[in-house]
Image: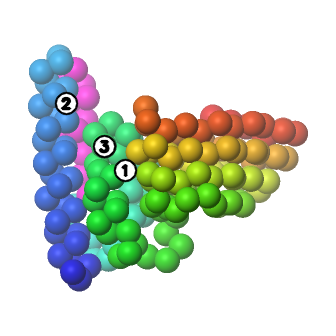
Amino acid sequence: MDEKKIIAHLYGGWREAKNKAERTARLEGDMLLARRLRACNVFTGEEETLAEVIAKLHSVEGLEFLLLTGFPSLELFREYKDALPEGCGVYVDAGEINLHGTLDAILVGDTQVKATYEQTECHNLTAVYGATANVDAYEWAVVRPRYDETSLVEARRHDCAIIL
C-alpha cells in the first residue's frame, strides 16, 4: 500500500474517532471538550507523507488525541509498523530498547524502554497499549512523560532535572 492510501485510511479512522469522542463528550455533558474536538484539525488528510502524519502525532494536540481517543489503535500501529519512516520516534512492539537523549518518543505495545536524558531540552515520552519505560533525567534535562491506563512510565530525576 502506498503512502497516499495509508494516509487516506488513517484520515478516515481519525475522523471516525474524532466524531465518536465528540458524541461521547456531548452525552457526558462536557460541552467544552466536545467543542474542542469539533474544532480539532490536527490531521487534515492532505498530508503528503507519513513523516508529516507522524510529526502531527508527536504534536501536543496529536498526543492528547491519542491518549483521549485511543487513535491510532494498536492494530493500526501494528498494521503500518513497516511503513513508518526510519527514525520517526515511534517504537511499535520493539521489545527491550535503550534511548539516550531522544527528544520525542512514542512507545507502543510490547516495548520496554530504558531512557536516559542529559540534554538541556524538553523530552516527550509517551507510552500506550502496554508499553513501559524507566527514565533517568540528569543535569538540566526536562522530561514530560505521558501514558495511558495500560502503560507505565517511571521517571527519576537527578541533579537539577525536571519531570513534568
When the figure is inspected, residue 47 is found, relative to residue 136, above or below; the finding is below
Q: Distance between the residues labelled 3 and 1?
A: 11 Å
Quick one: quadrant of the N terminus? bottom left
Camera-side mark, 2 or 3: 3
Is residue 93 shown left or right of residue 121? left
Reading the image, the residue beneath label 1 is 62
Q: Main secondary structure of the magenta part?
A: helix
* Residue type highlighted by circle 3: Gly
Crowdedness of circle 2 by 10 Å Cα count: few (<14), some, many (20+)? many
In the image, is residue 66 part of the stretch drawn in magenta? no
Asked whether residue 147 is in view, the answer is no
Give the label on residue 34, or none. Answer: 2
Asked whether residue 117 is in view, the answer is yes
Part of the protein shown in magenta: 30-43
Marks 3 & 1, CB-CB < 8 Å contact: no
Q: Nearer the viewer, residue 89 or 39?
A: 89
* Residue type highlighted by circle 2: Ala
SS label for mark 1: helix
Instruction: Please report the residue visible at 67 percent of the width from the left and 44 percent of the height from the top.
Output: 134
Marks 2 & 3, CB-CB < 8 Å contact: no
N-terminal of the two: label 2 or label 3?
2
Instruction: Please report the residue visible at 22 percent of the width from the left and 38 percent of the height from the top.
Output: 37
